Each structure stands twice: as C-alpha cells, then as structure tokens.
Amino acid sequence: MEINFKEYLMIIKKRLWLIVLVVLVTTILTALYTSSNYQPIYQASTKLIVNKTVEQDQLGREQIDYGAIGVNIALMNTYKEIIRTPAIMDKVVQRYPDLNVSSDQLISIVNVSNLNETQVMTIVARHFSHEKAVRIANAVSDVFQTEIPKIMKVDNITILNRAKVQDNPAPINQKSNQYLILSFVGSLAVMIGLTFLLDALDDTLKTDEDIRQVFEVSTLGYIPKVKSKALRTKQKNKSRKKAGEPSYAKTIH
C-alpha cells in the first residue's frame, strides 16, 4: 500500500507526544551522565636542551663541535626512554614524597617528546590537578638533569624553561556536545522507526481505501469524531441558551 508524505506526517503526529517525551528524557539523561563523569585533565610541560656542543680550541677560543651536535641528536631517543624508567621515576618519588604518586603512576602521567633534528626535548605531565601537573613536570626535569650524568657519564642537559602555574588553566579535554548530539539523533531515529512499526502492525481500518480493499464496497458517509472538549463546550452553550429563554406560565381554565 502506497503511503504519501502527508500520511507519514499524520502517523508521526499521532504519536508526537511520545516521540518528544522519549527524546527529551534520553537527551537529559545523557547530559547528566556526561556532566557527572566529566573530569578535566590539565597539562604542564618543561623544555630541556642537550647543549654541550661548545669546546675550546688551542687558543682558548670557544667553537661549536658539530660532531657533538649529531651525537646529542642521536642520544635524544635514549634520553626519552631513560626518563620514563624507574631509574628516574624512583628518584622523583624519593625526593618529592609530597607528590603522593608511585613510580608507575609517574610513568603513565609523564610523556617525553622532541622536535625532529633539534636538541630540544619536552617533558609533559598530565594530571587532574593543574598545580600537580606543574610540580610533576618540574620534579622530573630536575631529577633527570641531576641523574643523567651518573647514568650516561656526560653532563649535557640544561633546562630551558620550567612549568608554571597559570591563573586560569584550560583543560586539554574540553567538554564536547558529541554525545548529546548522538543521543538526540539516535533516540529521534529510533522513536520515528518505532512509530512506523507500530502503525504497520496496527491492522485496524483507518481510511475509506482500507474499507474498499477489505470489503470491496464503497463508503456512503462518515461519522465524525467529536472531541470531548468540543462536546462539553456545546452542552455548556446549550445550557446557557436555555437559561436565557423567558419562562411562560400556563393558565388552567
């Protein structure tokens, strides 16, 4: 049976209140869930440079050792792995007990990166507390700078800048409306599909075309459906009209 666009709208309109109710409740519950489970994550970073590339010549003049630059760049990957090992993190835990974190937690919190073909290395710490992320980044940098000469037998680490506490830090995981949009669209699509499914399962006769197909007869007339509100209004008007009519006295002869 063909259904035109107008009939589709009538099917949706018939259960519009249910569609709106379910979509509204689903969206509100999704908003409450995402808000209650949202926890901001803050990031702090320090920069270090592997910079022992200047040597003195025979006349006491300083000159850049370009061979040392290549060696330092080659050591960057080694330094990145050393930082995220218990050899460094255990020292951080010992020297900074007020951080209240274990070495395993520090390894998961701290990340190290470097710019390609440069001697600059960045230590990044992420935590639910911005202040604690700053303290962890600075603590790891300090320990690494003091411990690397003992491990690698070379003192070539300098801290370029330290992490600082900001007045209004912005979390790196900003709130997103993605789940709200998905919840709204998903619940709306499900309810519209369910509405058409219920209508397809409803085998009652709704139109004169349905009657002709089932009984093979034509309709002679319609009995309109009167809403209870309209019926009450009509009865009320009728009562007012009767109350306003003049009363007549009957004379008995």
Image (tube, rainbow, N blue to C red):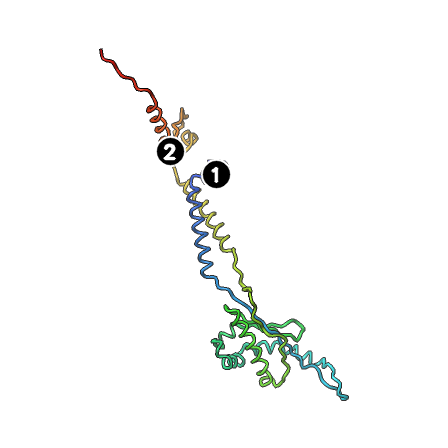
All told, the count of numbered labels is 2
Q: Give the farthest residue toward the left.
A: 253
Q: Give the farthest residue toward the bottom.
A: 58
Say what amino acid the circle numbered 1 marks. Answer: Leu
The residue tagged 1 is 9
Say what amino acid the circle numbered 2 marks. Answer: Lys
Q: Where residue 142 sits in the image (x, y, percent)?
A: 57, 79
Crowd around label 1: few <14 · some 14–19 · many ≥20 (10 Å): few
Left or right: 3 in relation to 60: left
Q: Are marks 1 and 2 in contact (CB under 8 Å)?
A: no
Q: Give the farthest residue toward the right.
A: 59
Decide which of 97, 183 is in the foreground and name it. Answer: 97
Helix, strand or loop at disc 1?
helix
Q: Where residue 115 sits in the image (x, y, percent)?
A: 64, 71
Q: Which numbered mark, 1 or 2, is in the foreground of this view?
A: 2
Q: Residue at x 50, y 69 (%)?
A: 129
Relative height, residue 14 to residue 231 (above, below): below
Q: Residue at x 63, y 76 (%)?
A: 160
Rounded to the nearest angstrom, the CA distance separating label 1 from label 2 is 24 Å
Relative height, residue 27 to residue 149 (above, below): above
Q: Where residue 94 sits in the image (x, y, percent)?
A: 49, 81
Q: Residue at x 41, y 44 (%)?
A: 18
Crowd around label 2: few <14 · some 14–19 · many ≥20 (10 Å): few
Q: Quadrant of the C terminus?
A: top left
Relative height, residue 4 to residue 243 (above, below): below
The residue tagged 2 is 229
Q: Where residue 44 sits in the image (x, y, percent)?
A: 56, 70
Decide which of 220, 153 is in the foreground and name it. Answer: 153
Helix, strand or loop at disc 2?
helix
Query: Mark number for residue 248?
Result: none
